[in-house]
Image: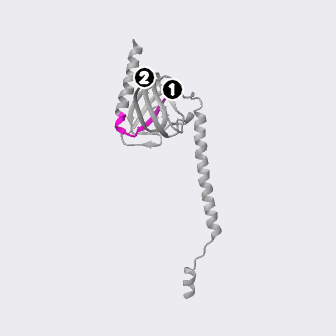
Amino acid sequence: MLLAAEKESAQVTDWAARIGWLVGLALFVALVYWLMREGWKWRGTLQGDLPELPTAPSEPGEATLTMSGRYHGSTTAGQWLDRIVAHGLGTRSRVELTLTDAGLDVVRPGATDFFVPLEALREARLDKGIAGKVLTEGGLLVVTWAHGERLIDSGFRSERAAEHNAWVDAINSMINKTETEGAR
């Protein structure tokens, strides 16, 4: 009886098996990461027909509104889970938005800046989510714009969420003003 108790209390560690499991787990994690990265690159390749992003004009005009915050990504309009990654549109970053009479200037430190001309703006609204980011109802400013043959939704969040309503009103009134002038 005493011999059986000694066998149970003795700890036997098979270090080779433990190290083998750790190496196997590390290789599995590396494989999953590599597959995710390849999927991201493949999505960019599939969206290769998207034209280059426009840049801000040399004289964009007087700033109507400015906002500091976060850029949460772009998706195909109306499909909040279909992320667009071509030309860096899928890269989340800090953002400085400036609305002028010429359009919307999106400056992203560490990522590709772009400009949405006034003629390309289609709508601004408050929403609760965009691919990979879900917030409370109305916590995200979503701007719909035309780029090439596609309509794109881009999601922004201000450091001061109370600013979102002013942005929605300003962008939509600029769009309505342009449509009214174009109909004349």
**Residue plotted at (63% across, 59% down):** 24
Magenta segment main secondary structure: strand
**Image quarter (top left, top right, bottom left or bottom right) of the C terminus:** top left
Q: CA distance from mark 1 to mark 2?
A: 12 Å
Q: Earlier in the sequence, mark 1 or mark 2?
A: 1
Circles 1 and 2 in contact, beta carbons < 8 Å = no
Residue 56 marker: 1
In the figure, is residue 73 to the left or right of 35? Answer: left
Residue 20, position as x, y percentages in the image: 64, 63
The residue at which mark 2 appears reads as: 101
Residue 127, position as x, y percentages in the image: 39, 36
**Residue plotted at (60% across, 40% down):** 41
Say which amino acid is labelled 2: Asp
Q: Residues within 10 Å of mark 2 (few under 14, many from 20)?
A: few
Instruction: Give the magenta-colored segment's residue range.
Output: 150-164
156 is within the stretch colored magenta: yes
Say which amino acid is labelled 1: Ala
**Image quarter (top left, top right, bottom left or bottom right) of the N terminus:** bottom right
Residue 80, position as x, y percentages in the image: 46, 37
**Residue plotted at (56% across, 84% down):** 6
